[in-house]
């Protein structure tokens, strides 16, 4: 084959590729160009799809909905012979999405990190049981959480399942009293969560490491934790607390009473930031929920003992911190003291954690290093304040001497002048 023939074949190949590309472009734009001219109900998807992850992956309308995207056949783009599906019924949505998301080979060519067992998990979830098992079309399906034509990656801040947005997405159903009527589920979970220690961290501070609904309830396999599983859920993050609790006598007592582990003291959606006020007597005490507020009650007496240890360490930390800050404000070098204060705070955190052992001896062991160090730092801060006081006296004395010399010199000059 001569060079001219080779060029001819090559040009033909390029032309064929260009025509195929043009045809593909036409197929891509045909559904969108037509729907863009329709009423809002049908044109909205064309706007939303511009930011959809599927659009960015190169998928067109017919990849999900079937039909003839070029619209040249007798029946137009909705040609049943071309496999047109249209909008699936609510109960069909999970399997509709699973055609791709459950196909290992297909998903491998798009995103290796995406799991392909979402439908398997969904069938075991409370949502799946209601929708697929009982035909309850009010139960959440894929589109209830991920939206429809503007689906985005989980890590996209605009995604409906981005950590900061997820509680609001769940609240779309679970905070709607009318929609949830008949399920026997409270609808104040989102309001409680928003004011909780987790909710404040996530929703107000934007800390995406803080737990959202799915961290406790699961994603596609979402289900309420059983009573005896709650500590396992909390233990996913609070590892030391869960271990100490499991080894304590309280675990057996709660199990015998049928009480949920962590939830009995801390609550669930409205978890408050824990502090010493949870122990012993007082408005915030959780010990009094089960124990008589009397020293004759061994459990209540234990709470008081642990409270006393923590109060002592917290008071030492506060007093020492105040002295160090005062010395710093006076211009003294306090960097080493300030750095060591972190160790005292860490000791307080560890002592608070040891509460879950329900052993005041262990709490005391954890607190003792902090108490000892706080006393040393307090002495150091007092030394600095004393040093500052001495410096002021020295400065005052030197200033008086200088003033006396100046006065004497002035008088001497006056005498010379006379």
Image (spheres, rainbow, N blue to C red):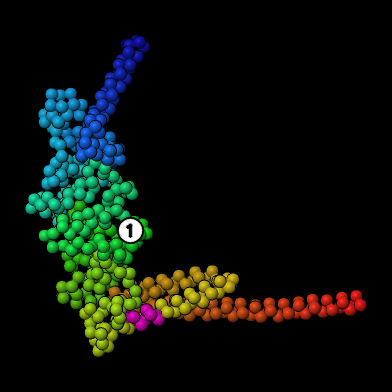
Predominant secondary structure, magenta span? helix
| Image position, residue 126 (x, y; %) | 14, 56
Nearer to us in this view, 127 or 178? 178
Nearer to us in this view, 9 or 310? 310
Quarter of the picture holding the C terminus? bottom right
**Snapshot quadrant of residue 306:** bottom left
- Can you name the residue that lies furthest to the front here? 39
**Snapshot quadrant of residue 61:** top left
Q: Check the image and report above or below for 71 versus 99.
A: above
Q: Residues within 10 Å of mark 1 (few under 14, many from 20)?
A: many
For the point 32% across and 65% down, the residue is 197
Queried whether the magenta region covers residue 311, the answer comes back as yes
| Image position, residue 79 (x, y; %) | 13, 29
- Element under label 1? helix
| Image position, residue 317 (x, y; %) | 44, 76
Quarter of the picture holding the N terminus? top left
For the point 32% across and 13% down, the residue is 8
For the point 54% across and 69% down, the residue is 335
Magenta segment boundaries in residue numbering: 306-313
- Can you name the residue that lies furthest to the left here? 134
For the point 22% across and 43% down, the residue is 148
Q: Check the image and report above or below for 111 versus 402.
A: above
Q: Check the image and report above or below for 109 versus 123.
A: above
- Residue 41 appears in the picture as rendered: yes
Queried whether the magenta region covers residue 267, the answer comes back as no
**Snapshot quadrant of residue 191:** bottom left
Task: Indicate left or right for 3 with 343 as reference.
Answer: left
> So how many labels did they put on this image?
1
- Can you name the residue that lies furthest to the bottom here? 296
- Residue 209 appears in the picture as rendered: no
Nearer to us in this view, 25 or 109? 25
Q: Residue under label 1, please give it.
A: 203
């Amino acid at each position: 084959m001569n060079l001219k023939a080779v060029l001819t074949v090559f040009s033909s190949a390029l032309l064929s590729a260009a025509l195929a590309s043009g045809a593909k472009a036409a197929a891509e734009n045909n559904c969108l160009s037509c729907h863009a001219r329709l009423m809002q109900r049908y044109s909205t998807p064309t706007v939303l799809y511009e930011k959809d992850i599927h659009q960015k992956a190169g998928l067109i309308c017919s990849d999900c909905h079937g039909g003839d995207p070029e619209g040249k056949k007798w029946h137009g783009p909705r040609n049943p012979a071309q496999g047109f599906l249209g909008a699936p019924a609510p109960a069909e949505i999970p399997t509709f999405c699973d055609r791709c998301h459950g196909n290992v080979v297909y998903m491998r060519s798009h995103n290796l990190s995406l799991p392909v067992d979402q439908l398997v998990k969904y069938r075991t979830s409370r949502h799946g049981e209601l929708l697929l098992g009982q035909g309850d079309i009010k139960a959440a399906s894929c589109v209830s959480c991920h939206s429809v034509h503007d689906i985005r990656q989980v890590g996209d801040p605009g995604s409906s399942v981005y950590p900061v947005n997820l509680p609001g997405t769940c609240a779309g159903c679970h905070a709607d009293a009318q929609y949830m009527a008949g399920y026997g589920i409270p609808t104040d979970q989102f309001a409680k969560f928003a004011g909780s220690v987790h909710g404040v961290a996530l929703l107000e501070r934007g800390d995406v490491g803080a737990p959202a609904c799915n961290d406790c309830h699961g994603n596609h396999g979402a289900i309420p934790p059983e009573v005896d599983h709650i500590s396992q859920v909390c233990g996913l993050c609070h590892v030391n607390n869960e271990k100490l609790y499991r080894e304590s006598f309280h675990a057996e007592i709660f199990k015998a009473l049928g009480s949920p582990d962590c939830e009995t003291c801390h609550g669930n959606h409205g978890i408050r930031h824990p502090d010493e006020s949870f122990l012993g007597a007082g408005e915030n005490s959780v010990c009094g929920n089960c124990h008589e507020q009397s020293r004759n009650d061994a459990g209540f007496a234990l709470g008081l003992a642990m409270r006393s240890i923590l109060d002592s360490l917290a008071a030492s930390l506060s007093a020492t911190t105040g002295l160090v800050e005062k010395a710093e404000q006076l211009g003294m070098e306090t960097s080493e003291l300030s750095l060591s204060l972190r160790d005292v705070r860490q000791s307080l955190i560890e002592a608070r954690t040891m509460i879950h052992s329900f052993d005041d001896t262990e709490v005391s062991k954890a607190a003792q290093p902090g108490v000892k160090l706080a006393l040393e730092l307090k002495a150091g801060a007092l030394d600095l304040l004393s040093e500052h006081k001495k410096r002021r006296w020295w400065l005052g004395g030197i200033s008086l001497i200088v003033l006396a010399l100046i006065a004497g010199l002035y008088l001497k000059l006056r005498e010379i002048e006379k």
